[in-house]
Amino acid sequence: MVKISTSGLAKKRGRNGAELFKGLEMAGWITREQKGWSLTDQGRALGGEYKESAQYGRYIVWPEKIDIPDGQGEMNGSKYLSATNVGEHYGFSNRRINAILSELGWIVKGLKGWEVTNQGKKQGGIQSENSKSGVPYVKWPEQILTSKSLQATIADLKGEKHAEPKPVEQCAESFREKFPAKFRATDGHMVRSKAEMLIDNWLYMAELVHAYERKLPISEDVYSDFYVPAGRVYIEYWGYENDPKYLARKAKKQQIYQTEGLSLIELNDEDVMNLDDILPRVLLKHGVKVSF
């Protein structure tokens, strides 16, 4: 399959290069990063990939015959879905779907309606608004229905079984076998260490809704230690600093959080001994107020 650069694609189709980049961004195929443009999961699924050039550095190429979006992020033959459409597919109301998408971190509640986040854009979400009321909402490419993160969340809410994916980290599976969840926290969560139990207990006593080992809202199967949906922030406790395999796993997860733009609070042993001082302060940075 012949693949050409985005600029080459624009020239070949007689399109303005800047407008094409904007269209690809609005369609959710690429996203702007500090160092340039990055592919989203949807962009990769459609055949986009990176190439390296000694002169230009990293750039994106596409299949030569790909259907490309216009300046509004639309594409001939594309089908975009509202939350109502997604809800009809899964048997949920549009309010329930928006709550789910918000928990995944793909949308956020604005003053008037729902707004797409950077994570939502990576899933192909496009910001739109009601033509009559002007209320903002987000529409999604039909491929959103095949998202593993969305499907797993829906299955959990319905109490249905779904295939348990293998973690992407090379040593994660052996780590879980080495450190089984045998510590019971106050809220009933079974966690893997005393430190995690102390963190879980602190979150519970602070009356903060939280999840343990929540899957990150990305295509890879990566799990956080804790997730606080009120601030869309993940918490990782780093222990076993003398274990080379654990350190490799830690570095890989840190890179994923940074690359995906996910909010992260990192705790070590010293922090765990001072949770009353540490967590209220760092959580507040993410808009989460603690009552004590």
Image: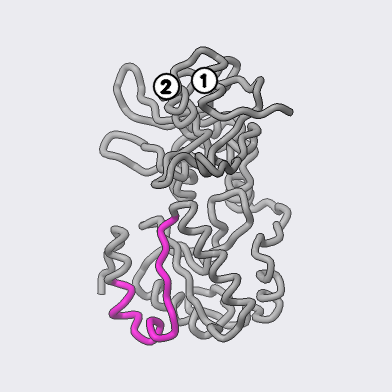
Crowd tier of the residue under label 1, counting other residues whose Cα lies within 10 Å: few below 14, some 14–19, many 20 or above: some
What is the C-alpha distance between the residues marked 2 and 1?
A: 9 Å
Report if residue 63 lies within the magenta region: no
Q: Can residue 90 be seen in the rendering of this structure?
A: no
- Residue 47 figure quarter: top right
Q: What residue appears at the point 64 percent right and 36 percent down from the top-left corner?
A: 45
Query: Which of pointers 2 and 1 lies earlier in the amino acid sequence?
Result: 1
In the rendering, at what x and y percent does residue 291 appear? 26, 70
**Is label 1 in a helix, a strand or a loop?**
helix
Q: Is residue 43 left or right of residue 211?
A: right
* Residue 147 versus residue 141 in the image, above or below: below
Picture mark count:
2
Quadrant position of the C terminus in the picture: bottom left
Q: Amino acid at mark 2?
A: Glu
> In the image shown, does 200 or 39 lie closer to the viewer?
39
In the rendering, at what x and y percent does residue 117 appear? 40, 42
Crowd tier of the residue under label 2, counting other residues whose Cα lies within 10 Å: few below 14, some 14–19, many 20 or above: some
Give the residue at mark 1. Answer: 10
* Residue 85 versus residue 212 in the image, above or below: above
> In the image shown, does 44 or 213 lie closer to the viewer?
44
